[in-house]
Amino acid sequence: MDSLSQLDQVKTTPWAGGRSPWNVEYGKLMMWFFLLSDAFTFSSLLVYYGAQRFTKFTWPAPDKVFQSIPGIAEHGAPLVFVGIMTFILIMSSVTMVLAVEAGHRKAKKAVIGWMVATIIGGFMFLGCQAIEWTHLHHDGFWWGSIPTNPNELATFFNGPVSPVAAHQFANLFFTITGFHGFHVFSGVVINIIILCMTINGTFERRGHYLMVEKVGLYWHFVDLVWVFVFTFFYLV
Amino acid sequence: MSEHHINTTEEHGHDDHGGMTVGKIWKVFGILLLITVIEFIIALWAIPHHHITQQVGNYIYIGLTLLKAFYIVAYFMHLKFEKLGLQLVLTVSFVFIIYFIALMLIEGNYLNAHMPQA
């Protein structure tokens, strides 16, 4: 066999060119890479938060700061409200996978139904976060501000009190949950766009529901970040 | 060359390459819910009643969080069913974050010991 006909042979190995070596569609791969970079951003924020906490000899106690259920109990119910928020977000993640699964079956009605459920879950989470922020703001916390009355400030600590630690806590809490909330908000907007495209039959004509998978990746990532925010702000 | 080829066919022959069935989705949901419930039991019962210290609790929290992250990424984000190359690209990159965590915690410990506390 001469060398020329060897060159003409069809190459079948994954990296031989002519096809995606990972069997992943281009847009989906780019979504993964975007999420990787986004994960680095969130990691940096959370690592900085951890470093600040390590630096300080005291820190506001989560079960003192977050102990109200809006409209039900002002005090004495630590972590319950954020538990509800966590449940809502996990639940909306499940409805998103179900939408993706329906997309695999090309079941347009089911995709629409699960997307609507996901969007409702997103709005519920955002509503809860708005209530949480309002509550903390009423307590006196905001970017650059903490309760001015020292006795009031002391109610948020288990041990010794530090205004510097309280400031760091307030700034980082609003920055990190704000950045996460912004992701939830943009996720909801993107989900609504995809829902409209599904209703219009765009994906039906296209023959696949890959776009639903891509926004699904984004939505799960938002849920993933919340898992970490929840641990480091509310539990540890 | 032939080795390469065997590898790809192996990956294609991977179990449930098709992905997630509805039953499996709810199973993963159940696991995530269960882990969260365990976290709440630790936060609201085990630590306040001094069954475990906060320090031990923190390690358990972080372990459970990573477990939850695994289930979300592997099953909901479907990474378990992707090719090995993509899996490696998306996970090994976090070695930089681990390095960053180590750096910042060492720095934080140093400052904790040496900064005037006010």
Image (cartoon, coloured by chain):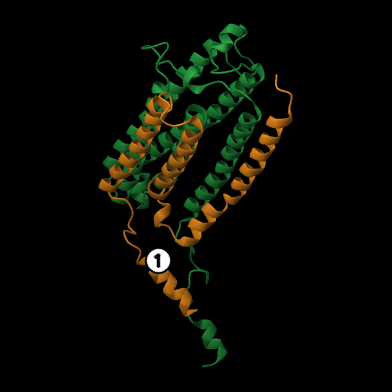
Chain colours: A green, B orange
A86, A10: nearer the viewer? A86
Check disc 1: other Cα within 10 Å, few if <14, some if 14-19, many if 20+.
some
Residue A36 sits above or below residue A89 on the image: below
Residue A26 sits above or below residue B67 on the image: below
Residue drawn at x 42%, y 44% is B67
Residue drawn at x 43%, y 57% is B82
Q: State whether residue A14 appears in this view.
A: yes
Mark 1 secondary-structure assignment: helix
Residue drawn at x 57%, y 37% is A42
Residue drawn at x 45%, y 57% is A24
Residue A155 sits above or below residue A34 on the image: above
Residue B11 sits above or below residue A199 on the image: below
The x, y position of residue A113, in whole percent, is 29, 36
Left-right relation of A209 to A187: left
The x, y position of residue A103, in whole percent, is 32, 47
Q: State whether residue A186 appears in this view.
A: no
Residue under numbered circle 1: B11
Location of residue A149 by image quarter: top right
B50, A228: nearer the viewer? B50
Q: Amino acid at mark 1?
A: Glu
